[in-house]
Image (cartoon, rainbow, N blue to C red):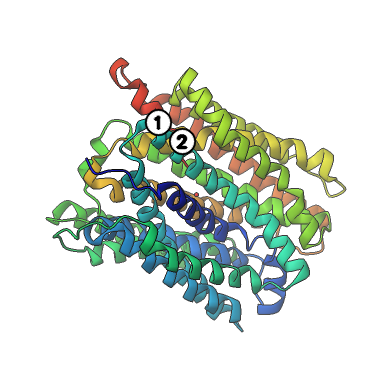
């Protein structure tokens, strides 16, 4: 075994920053959405595409990113991802109209899809020599994701209030430049491996996911029974079925389907999918409730969610590893999802004349506690199940599960909110009714996740408890 890198903890800081940024980019636009909507002319229903353009590209290409990381080396892909993210951030910031904005967001998602799996592979390479160090490194890396998601809301508020909304994208540029300069000296090199790249598989899965999200978002406007809705959904199903067929037949597929026979991996990925499908709609509509109903401006809206950030950080770094060690990853995952469901059900009680202290703060803290507990062990189970040489693939799959869940959950809850009045800007009662319906729907998703986790996650055997728990102390 090679000697551990003396710069590994400095490298971890860059890896954690990468995870923070790619998840922050899903949330930093939240507070800025009303300004973006006003300046570029988005409709209320289509506004979610500022989020979805990033997440669909991110989630749809993560498997390709993981495969490329395994083939060409994680360090190369890590650097390439930062360069692409920088480019997309510049385009999104200067966008003069809707299509340019969405293009920039999609390019950002492509960069994130290369960064995320290669970052996790680099972490495993740097710290795999020592289980205790790996536990600590994964816990710090794990805290970076939800912290980035929630901190992005606060940063977005500060930037939108005191600068302007394009700066929520420009903030990535100096960080990306520093990351590009530091990647070579800090990150371990890996030899390229022989193998082919399944471009057709990547194309079909990305288009299939994008078509699914598009159909669900547009359904309230075109009608759930309309030919357009069902034609697009049928096309999405055909594309996803083609992806599975391609993976089954290719000698070197983008995603080896048999990997899901690995004990715990499929169940953990399903849990991550439902977790993303519940958490992201809550964050999205809570931002809109604070601004469009309670009348908060950008900075107070971001600051209102800071308590969630603090609790998530404490939960990830301190509480989750201890509870996993005592009760096991399955029990902690189920409990976390149940708490998340309870917090969002509480949020559904918001009123047009509500206030932060009564309507938002306590419920959001319960939801944040649930998120911090469920996220860590389900991710740990997923990435610890794969073979070492498929580390990039495993991290790509679990990141895909979370991001796909995020996109589909938000698309579905956007449709639910629209059907219950969220499109009636200025009508506080209708807006609140729509947001409340979305919170109820997201709560139901989290509850379904808790029940499925209880039924499908397998407890580890006596000889495997310790390593499983070590690997479970991990990371949108």
* SS for dot 2: helix
Q: Are marks 1 and 2 in contact (CB under 8 Å)?
A: yes
The residue sitting at the top extreme is 462
Q: Position of residue 68 (x, y in %)?
A: 27, 61
Circle 2 crowding by C-alpha within 10 Å: few under 14, some 14–19, many from 20: some
- CA distance separating discs 1 and 2: 6 Å
Residue 106 or residue 164, whichever sits in front: 164
Between residues 166 and 50, which one lies in front from this camera angle? 166
Secondary structure under badge 1?
Answer: helix
Residue 425 as seen in the image, left or right of residue 407: right
When asked about the image quadrant of residue 367, the answer is top right
Instruction: Judge whether 236 appears above or below 327 on screen.
Output: below
Q: Residues within 10 Å of mark 1 (few under 14, many from 20)?
A: some
The picture places residue 51, in percent across and down from the top left corner, at: 56, 62
Q: Which mark is residue 132?
A: 1
Q: Which mark is residue 136?
A: 2
The image shows residue 433 at horizontal and vertical percentages of 74, 49
Q: Is residue 164 left or right of residue 188?
A: right
- Residue at left 75%, top 35%? 362
């Amino acid at each position: 075994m090679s000697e551990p890198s003396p710069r590994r903890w400095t490298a971890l800081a860059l890896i954690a920053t990468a995870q923070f940024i790619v998840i922050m980019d899903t949330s930093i636009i939240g507070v800025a959405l009303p300004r973006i909507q006003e300046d570029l002319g988005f409709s209320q229903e289509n506004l979610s595409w500022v989020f979805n353009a990033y997440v669909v590209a991110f989630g749809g290409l993560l498997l390709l990113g993981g495969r490329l990381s395994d083939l060409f080396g994680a360090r190369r892909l890590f650097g390439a991802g930062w360069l692409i993210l920088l480019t997309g951030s510049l385009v999104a910031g200067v966008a003069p109209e809707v299509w340019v904005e969405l293009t920039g967001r999609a390019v950002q998602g492509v960069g994130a899809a290369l960064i995320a799996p290669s970052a996790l592979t680099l972490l495993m390479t740097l710290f795999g020599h020592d289980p205790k160090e790996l536990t600590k490194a994964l816990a710090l890396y794990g805290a970076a994701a939800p912290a980035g998601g929630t901190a992005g809301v606060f940063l977005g508020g500060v930037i939108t209030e005191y600068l302007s909304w394009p700066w929520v994208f420009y903030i990535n540029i100096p960080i990306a430049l520093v990351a590009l300069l530091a990647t070579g000296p800090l990150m371990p090199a890996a030899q390229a491996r022989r193998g082919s790249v399944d471009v057709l598989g990547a194309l079909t899965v990305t288009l299939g996911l994008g078509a699914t999200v598009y159909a669900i978002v547009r359904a309230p406007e075109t009608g759930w029974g309309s030919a357009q809705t069902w034609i697009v959904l049928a096309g999405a199903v055909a594309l996803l079925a083609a992806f599975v067929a391609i993976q089954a037949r290719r000698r070197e597929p983008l995603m080896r389907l048999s990997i899901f026979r690995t004990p715990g991996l499929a169940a953990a990925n399903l849990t991550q999918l439902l977790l993303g499908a519940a958490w992201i709609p809550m964050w999205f509509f809570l931002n809109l409730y604070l601004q469009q109903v309670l009348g908060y401006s950008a900075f107070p809206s971001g600051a209102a969610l800071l308590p969630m950030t603090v609790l998530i950080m404490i939960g990830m770094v301190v509480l989750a590893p201890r509870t996993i060690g005592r009760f096991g990853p399955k029990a902690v995952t189920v409990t976390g999802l149940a708490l998340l469901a309870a917090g969002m059900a509480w949020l559904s009680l918001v009123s047009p004349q509500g206030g932060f202290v009564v309507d938002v703060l306590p419920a959001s803290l319960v939801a944040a506690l649930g998120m911090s507990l469920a996220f860590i062990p389900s991710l740990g189970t997923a990435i610890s199940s794969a073979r070492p040489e498929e580390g990039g693939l495993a991290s790509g799959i679990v990141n895909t599960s979370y991001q796909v869940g995020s996109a589909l959950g938000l698309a579905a809850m956007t449709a639910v909110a629209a059907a219950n009045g969220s499109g009636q800007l200025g009508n506080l009662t209708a807006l609140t009714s729509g947001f409340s319906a979305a919170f109820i729907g997201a709560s139901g998703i989290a509850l379904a996740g808790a029940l499925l986790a209880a039924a499908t996650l397998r407890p580890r055997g006596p000889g495997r408890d310790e390593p499983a728990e070590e690997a479970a102390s991990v990371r949108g």
